[in-house]
Amino acid sequence: MVTTKISLEVDELPKRWYNIVPDLPTPLPPPKDPEKGASRLQNLPDIFSMEVLKQEMSLDRYIPIPKQVRDLYIQAGRPRPLFRAKRLEKYLKTPAKLYYKSEFYSPTGSHKVNTAIPQAYYAKKQGIKRMVTETGAGQWGTALAYACSLLDLDLTVYWVRAASTWKKSRRHFMQLLGAKVFDSPSNHTQIGKELLRKDPQHVGSLGIAIAEAVQDAQADETAVYSLGSVLNHVLLHQSIIGLECQKQFKKIDTYPDVIISCLGGGSNFGGLAIPFLRDSIKEKRPIRFLATQSAAAPNLTGTYRYDYGDYAEQTPLLKMCTLGHRTSFKPIKADGLRYHGAAPIISALRHQGFIDTISYPQDETYVFDKAKIFLQTEGFLPAPESAYSITAAIDEAIRCKRKREHKTILFNVSGHGFMDMEGYEEKILRKNRSSQ
Ligand SMILES: *Cc1c(COP(=O)(O)O)cnc(C)c1O
């Protein structure tokens, strides 16, 4: 009898996050200012909370998770189970062993709660009254609204109009948690007003929404800005995912050969992979890392260079794999995979050959079909973004079948799809109906 669920006790929840920066093969290129114009780096203390900024620059290998954050992680359901996908393996008739991490158990439906909680905690501790952020798909806004609600902070969310107009339930969820939600571009910031003057129906972009949130936070001394992906401190907080997985694999005396997750800005991929990337760098463990993307925004295939994080060029320049900060991307249902740049840590490791990438067609039928297989075998409805992880895991398992390889594959299911039914309706049900 093979156990399909590998759990950790509450007191086995890791007590420290892991920071890979001091263990990278070469030093991480630091953020920098453009040659002309005002300093962006000098503004950072006005934008971020002190502890988050300290963590962003930290070279400490392990950073203790504060007791109250651990309590809130437990409240949010951590540690999360690791599942062996026995039923999916049987369906695929593969000799590969498939394991997935259940981030879909998060109370707001995604892994983003793992960084929302500590970011809100540090802001509160510093005496901050309000947090400001942007959201694309809506997952990050909801996660931060949840954390702000538990920690009694106000929250303002700038939400990319392209997504906000068709995701009514997500808006209601954020509002129920107490957040103020503005469609972006909005009339609340300079940059928003300028863009609306040119085009009152402007659909916005993540880069524009970031610019609005940064402007808002900078103008208010009692507010801090918060980002849900890309930055070092976000990947640090998300390392809880991979650290738990390492303990879980130890319990069953197993170790993965292949590690897969979807990548938008890099936080769930990084969170899962980073503790294992350490083993790959420091102990030369032979692991294949695979980041899955949409052909609509395959930022890991972009050039590795310094670029802005936002449309309005208010952020410092970050060295990352980028498609360009003014690029606009076709809408896709996996909206969380639509950002121009990948996290500097992941970009550096990609550039050094540690990480492979694959991108799936924009039409998304291919990945939604795989999500349906996962739902019908394992019983969980994945977020559209997570469908990209599942697709790569299934493709890899099929390859193992052809080559008769008994590989152990670990993938992350970063969120649930309960609020993404339109995607499933459009990509699967409607197609089925028209072919009947
Ligand atoms: C935001 C999001 C992603 C993509 O963002 P990353 O920072 O690359 O992880 C993936 N899955 C879900 C469920 C998300 O909400």
Image: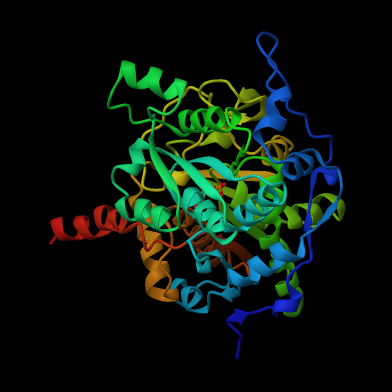
Percent of width and height locating residue 216: 53, 31
Tell me the quadrant of the picture where the C terminus can be found.
bottom left
Percent of width and height locating residue 339: 50, 36
Q: As drawn, is 27 to the left or to the right of 111?
A: right
Percent of width and height locating residue 89: 50, 74
Residue plotted at (52% across, 55% down)? 143
Residue plotted at (53% across, 60% down)? 393
Q: Nearer the viewer, residue 31 or 221?
A: 221
**Residue 49 in view, yes or no:** yes
Compared with residue 293, is residue 434 higher up or lower down, i.e. above or below?
below
Q: Quadrant of residue 221?
A: top right
Compared with residue 113, is residue 306 higher up or lower down, i.e. above or below?
above
Numbered marks: total: 0
Compared with residue 66, is residue 266 higher up or lower down, i.e. above or below?
above
Compared with residue 239, is residue 193 higher up or lower down, i.e. above or below?
above
Q: Quadrant of residue 330?
A: top left
Q: As drawn, is 167 to the left or to the right of 77?
A: left
Q: Residue furthest bottom?
A: 1
**Residue 97 in view, yes or no:** no
Residue plotted at (65% across, 33% down)? 47
Q: Nearer the viewer, residue 285 or 376?
A: 376
Q: As drawn, is 169 to the left or to the right of 143?
A: left
